[in-house]
Image (spheres, rainbow, N blue to C red):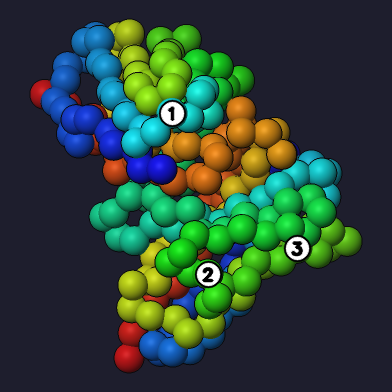
């Protein structure tokens, strides 16, 4: 079964750090671009980061310089290192697979169940 | 690129035809996807490349459009279709604000 399972969420103080993990199974992880998407409670979806099969990375302005996406193909794992966390980063964080890596005629076809990150003192 | 969905919410009855619109602030060719999300669940891919139905998605869902104006249509609303729907642009990955489909 194709599956993504996130872990690592929790409560962290403002200014703190947290590392999220996403374990992939059921497909050739190294062949796909991967993404992180977040959703604050009661709000819409926000794309957070992307990593290509070659390790190239992309971020929106809201997290650039604070978040780092990485992957470890040997472990079928995706990571999100989050530093300098703010209250506005509080959300459920999902990892997602890119259906047709490298093509804009694509979409996010497989999603994990999400992991909750709460930034609060 | 900004994506604006309309309406932000709608009420409809089972069997109704429902149309949701997504407008891009500049042309994005056919680089658009649609997702369905139910409370407490991850989004589910419905449509990609503006009009391609994802495997396993019922044929009552369809997508159309290119450039700046896109539409998601549910031909006959079913009880399991009450959810929030999002569009997404696949060049720089922003999502629309969502459309909540509620029971009338």
Q: What subunit carries mark 3? A: A
Q: Which of marks 2 and 3 is nearer the N terminus?
A: 2
Query: Marks 1/2: CA distance?
Result: 25 Å
- Regarding mark 2 in the picture, which secondary structure is present there? loop
Q: Is residue B66 left or right of residue A106?
A: left
Q: Distance between the residues labelled 1 and 3?
A: 32 Å
Q: Where is residue B104 in the image (x, y as percent from the top left)?
A: 11, 24
> Where in the figure is residue A119, as x and y percent of width and height?
38, 80
Q: Name the residue under label 3.
A: A71
| Residue under pointer 2 | A64
Mark in front: 1 vs 2: 1
Host chain of mark 2: A
Q: In this view, does A93 lie to the left or right of A21?
A: left
Q: Which of B50 and A44 is in front in this view?
A: B50
SS class, disc 1: loop
Name the residue: 48% across, 89% down: A16
Q: Residue at x 69, y 56 (%)?
A: A51
């Amino acid at each position: 079964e194709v599956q993504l399972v996130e872990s690592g969420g929790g409560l962290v103080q403002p200014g703190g750090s947290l590392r999220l993990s996403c374990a992939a199974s059921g497909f050739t992880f190294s062949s796909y671009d991967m993404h992180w998407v977040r959703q604050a409670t009661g709000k819409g979806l926000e794309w957070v980061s992307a990593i290509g099969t070659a390790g190239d990375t992309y971020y929106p302005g809201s997290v650039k310089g604070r978040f780092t996406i990485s992957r470890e193909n040997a472990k079928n794992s995706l990571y999100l290192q989050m530093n300098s966390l703010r209250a506005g980063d509080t959300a459920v964080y999902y990892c997602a697979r890119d259906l047709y890596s490298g093509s804009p005629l694509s979409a996010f076809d497989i999603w994990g169940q999400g992991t909750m990150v709460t930034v609060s003192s | 690129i900004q994506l604006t969905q309309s309406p932000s919410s709608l009420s409809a009855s089972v069997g109704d035809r429902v149309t949701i619109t997504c407008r891009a602030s500049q042309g994005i060719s056919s680089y658009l996807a649609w997702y369905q999300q139910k409370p407490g669940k991850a989004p589910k891919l419905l449509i990609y490349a503006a009009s391609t139905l994802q495997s396993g998605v019922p044929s009552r869902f369809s997508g159309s459009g290119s450039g700046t104006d896109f539409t998601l249509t549910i031909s006959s609303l079913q009880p399991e279709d009450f959810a929030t729907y999002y569009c997404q642009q696949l060049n720089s990955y922003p999502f629309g604000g969502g459309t909540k489909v509620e029971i009338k």
